[in-house]
Amino acid sequence: MRPAPTALWLRLALALGLALVGPLAGGRASVRAPIYVSSWAVRVSQGYREAERLARKFGFVNLGEIFPDGQYFHLRHRGVVQQSLTPHWGHHLRLKREPKVQWFEQQTLRRRVKRSLAVPSDPWFPQQWYMNNEMQSDLNVLQVWNQGLTGQGVVVSVLDDGIEKDHPDLWANYDPLASYDFNDYDPDPQPRYTPSDENRHGTRCAGEVAAVANNGFCGTGVAFNARIGGVRMLDGTITDVVEAQSLSLQPQHIHVYSASWGPEDDGRTVDGPGVLTREAFWRGVTQGRGGLGALFVWASGNGGLHYDNCDCDGYTNSIYTLSVGSATQQGRVPWYSEACASTLTTTYSSGVATDPQIVTTDLHHQCTDKHTGTSASAPLAAGMIALALEANPFLTWRDMQHLVVRASKPAQLQAEDWRTNGVGRRVSHHYGYGLLDAGRLVDLARTWLPTQPQKKCAIRVVHSPTPILRLMHVTRNLSACAGRGNWIRSLEHVQVQLSLTYSRRGDLQISLTSPMGTRSTLVAIRDAVPLHAAAVRDGRGHDRAAPGPPGDQQRACAAGHRGAVPG
């Protein structure tokens, strides 16, 4: 049977007219100048021997493979300054002339911020309101524990600033094979201690997932018998190499990678994974877990106060990550929350200063009930996914996205943008499909039949520069590749890649409307937005007269839409 023709509507709402011509750029961009470091990523055609030859010829030190297949190598040059505002053109030309060098890139510093909120630490299961059945709509974890599922056999690694592996509530579940320090390149992920305890973030996230149960200390992790590892990669020089190596650590051993960081949530930054990190995501979902695919759980971002939009974050926005948002105990949108089409599900976190927060492990063998932000939401989801993997270890990365959609419920979550999509599911840009229910997730996982192999269909919508009016619709009728081997039976992901020029990205809005009328905002207007009431109550004001985000940076938001699973 031939599928019915499909119409995709792309709406661009602009404050001023513009032309669709080249890469998204503008005059007053807030982009920082890249800072080049003394290392290069190089892909060579003849493996380790060729990498060694290049290193000896040009004075590099070969730091080894980036991936285990012997194609990509990490080279460092001791004669190059550690940080520079300009690339080293001499080495650029030398590597370019080498016929066996297929690709190379001098590495640059990448700013990544931990998605926690700066709240003082303070001194466990009675206080874990989000899963102890004291509230009507909690995460329904007790139901799963009562079935005997506790994360046994599942390995979760927290990519962050390290974890305190000897913590009394973590050491029994600590997994050295799921751990590494890519800041200092050694196997020990122990955090660097400072007077301000700035490197507590990873330890806190790890405790949410796998803090030991029934040991008379702190609280309990969602998957308290899962193995927990930590990757120290945020407390030093962050490059594309570091991110790719972190996301590629032990892909046949680690099941779930939990990441609560990303580009700065300042309402101005448009950034995403580099060449190697994109490759790491692809390898993870195609080769990880014996071909079932690694599960990358990502915090959606804390830039709500700055009108940030997580669709302009290429990590949460990737179809390969499972992006998690936050809700307060009262079911409200937190003041720091970012709304975007890429958010798939929601768990709990903090709200205003008087709201309860998340209980977890802390540095110096301590506990805290002050963990906050979307940083606290993503590890809760990672723990619930570990429970589902124990129930069914054969779930693929795409299976898990289907299950998370079906196991998320609007519950008592309050938002003005709840809509019913074409297949009858409620969806919101604030919460995705709603609050993740661990009991429902596990029940569905037990009986889930594997999805069919992924197929892709690419459609070119705009072919030439076109003047754009204040409000413009771009439509295209298509038959989902009917008549070809890759015809689409059900729709999981839609990715829109746009090239355009405009002087004020903050005035640009882009939306995608499905054939059944579900409208997803891919890029939202990022200034002149009313401040959320919770932020006002919390005393966090905003100068409405202050200028909005300036003109554009190097590239457009890579707006990926995951709001139509399956249809």
Image (cartoon, rainbow, N blue to C red):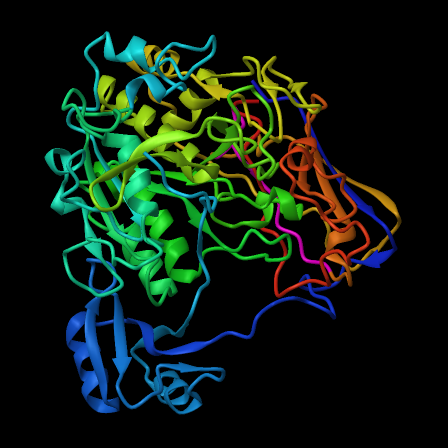
- Residue 487 is a magenta residue: yes
Front residue of 335 and 524: 335
Q: Quadrant of the N terminus?
A: top right
Q: Quadrant of the C terminus?
A: top right
Residue 179 screen position, x and y as percent: 19, 49
Count of marks, rendered view: 0
Residue 555 screen position, x and y as percent: 61, 61
Residue 431 screen position, x and y as percent: 56, 27
Rendered view: 75 above or below 172: below
Front residue of 301 and 98: 301
Left or right: 507, with 133 as reference point? right
Where residue 62 sits, quadrant-wise, is: bottom left
Residue 419 visible somewhere in the drawing: yes
Magenta range is: 486-500
Residue 492 visible somewhere in the drawing: no
Residue 210 screen position, x and y as percent: 23, 31
Question: What secondary structure do most residues of the magenta stretch adopt?
Answer: loop
Where residue 278 sits, quadrant-wise, is: bottom left
Q: Residue at the location (26% across, 76% down)?
A: 75
- Residue 268 is a magenta residue: no
Q: Residue at the location (70% across, 64% down)?
A: 22
Where residue 24 sits, quadrant-wise, is: bottom right
